[in-house]
């Protein structure tokens, strides 16, 4: 299913925000003129990645233990995280940012 998360101009370049979509916390980031969507929960310690920082381009750092995840692939790039986080397809339709999630 597709879900509109916000207007593109509501998420300025080099920012990220958490959205609750169908009960799932998702992080949407705007980096390098692209939008990315990943699960907003660290695979290591259940912290919200959206409370961390964007680092080194298309990466987010967890606020609890500094694990870094790739926004494009969800891959865990540093310890203590070893498991990836889920990624979601995202597009801009007109002025809207739309994410596609699997129907439960």
Image (cartoon, helix red, strand yellow):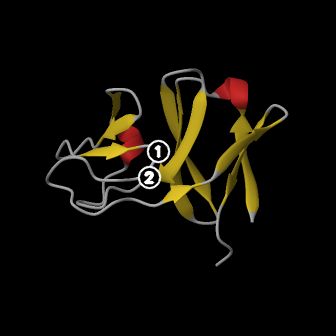
Q: In terms of depth relative to the viewer, which is nearer, 21 or 29?
A: 29
Where does the image place residue 88, in percent across and percent down from the top left? 57, 56
**Quarter occupied by the C terminus:** bottom right
Where does the image place residue 87, in percent across and percent down from the top left? 50, 56
Where does the image place residue 69, in percent across and percent down from the top left? 32, 46
- SS state under label 1: loop
- Relative to 39, 83 lies left or right: left
- Relative to 45, 71 lies left or right: right
- SS state under label 2: loop
Where does the image place residue 77, in percent across and percent down from the top left? 25, 47
Depth check, mark 1 against mark 2: the one in front is: 1
For image coordinates 21% across by 56% down, the residue present is 81
Residue bearing the label numbered 2: 40
- Relative to 84, 37 lies left or right: right
For image coordinates 44% across by 43% down, the residue present is 71
User: Which image quadrant is residue 35 in?
Assistant: top right
Task: Indicate whether 89 appears above or below 104.
Answer: above
Q: Residue furthest bottom?
A: 104
For image coordinates 37% across by 50% down, the residue present is 48
Q: Which label is found at residue 72? A: 1
Q: Are marks 1 and 2 in contact (CB under 8 Å)?
A: no
Q: Earlier in the sequence, mark 1 or mark 2?
A: 2
């Amino acid at each position: 299913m597709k879900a509109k998360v916000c207007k593109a101009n509501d998420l300025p370049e080099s920012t990220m925000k958490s959205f609750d979509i169908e009960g799932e916390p998702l992080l949407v980031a705007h980096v390098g003129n692209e939008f990315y969507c990943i699960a907003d929960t660290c695979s290591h310690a259940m912290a919200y990645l959206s409370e961390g920082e964007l680092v080194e381009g298309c990466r987010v750092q967890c606020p609890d233990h500094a694990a870094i995840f790739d926004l494009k692939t969800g891959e865990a790039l540093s310890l203590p995280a070893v498991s990836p986080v889920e990624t979601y397809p995202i597009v801009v339709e007109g002025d809207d940012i739309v994410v596609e999630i699997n129907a439960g």
